[in-house]
Amino acid sequence: MKYFLDSAKLDEIKIAYEDYGFDGVTTNPKHIMASGKSFMTAIQDIANYVADKPDFPVSVEIDPHLKTANDMVAMATKISQISPNFVIKIPTNPEGIKAARHLEAIGIRTNMTLVFSPAQAIMPGKIHAKYVSPFVGWKEDYGDDGMSYVKDIMTIYHNYGFDTEIIVAAIRNATQIQQAAIYGADIVTCSLAVYQNSFRNPYTDLGLQIFQNAWDHTETGD
Ligand code: E4P
């Protein structure tokens, strides 16, 4: 399962790539805002960093105000010219599907985002979008079972042999990461803090204390 970092902060992206060997990045307008930079500066800085990393895709979202497929295609085309690593996030709605279908046909890869039901995930598969992003965390924030619709999407994709990769997005905790892995999801995306929490366990810290105690009561023999 690939690990994507959900962030537009360059310092976090560097840690993800250089320290942990993560596989890619996803951004959204909230992350760009949190980077404290303008949209163009934030994405240009990321583009510069990934310029020598051809296998490190970066999802960049178009202006969420855009209403027509034509406007979405125009902005996606402009952004995609900044970096070959960029995959363009397009909202999963009627105009977005039209736009993404056109973009994929002209070789601009898309990540169909804001998916909240299995039915919504079918068209991204049919049009061969590069990625589809079900937002598990947003569903679970409001009491829905996020992972069950991911499982349903995986079943549908398996049934029809869709090649679109499923990014289990808006992951909030280690349980969701492990469930995604158990289901065999292609990719998860979440913050650096959530990943780092999934790397640790209080028993590991306790075990270290026990071993430190033993170490301290043993001659090193140097
Ligand atoms: C996915 O591509 C989105 O950027 C994302 O996961 C949104 O989730 P958030 O609410 O955790 O930022």
Image (cartoon, rainbow, N blue to C red):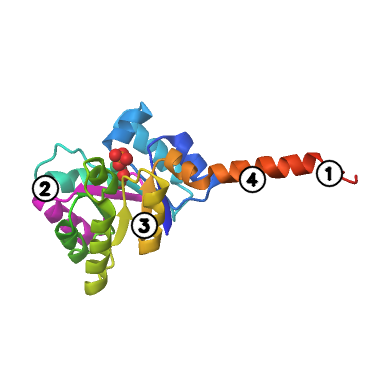
Q: What is the x, y in percent for residue 2?
A: 42, 56
Residue with the mark numbered 1: 218
Compute the Cα span from label 3 to label 4.
28 Å
> What amino acid type should be assigned to the residue bearing mark 1?
Thr
> What amino acid type should be assigned to the residue bearing mark 3?
Ala
Relative placement, left or right, of 67 versus 144 is: left
Q: Earlier in the sequence, mark 2 or mark 4?
A: 2
Q: Earlier in the sequence, mark 3 or mark 2?
A: 2
Can you say which quadrant of the picture contains the C terminus? top right
* Tag shown at residue 207: 4
Residue with the mark numbered 3: 180
Q: Residue furthest top?
A: 36
Count numbered badges in the picture.
4
Relative placement, left or right, of 87 versus 210 is: left
> What amino acid type should be assigned to the residue bearing mark 2?
Asn
Q: In the picture shown, does residue 218 fall above or below 149?
A: above
Question: Mark 1–mark 2 contact, CB under 8 Å?
Answer: no
Q: Which residues are magenta?
A: 81-108
- Along the line of sight, which residue is nearer the eye, 157 or 16? 157
Q: How crowded is the residue under tag 2: few (<14 C-alpha within 10 Å), some, or many (20+)?
A: some
Question: Mark 1–mark 3 contact, CB under 8 Å?
Answer: no
- Along the line of sight, which residue is nearer the eye, 133 or 219? 219
At numbered mark 4, what does the secondary structure look like: helix, strand or loop? Answer: helix
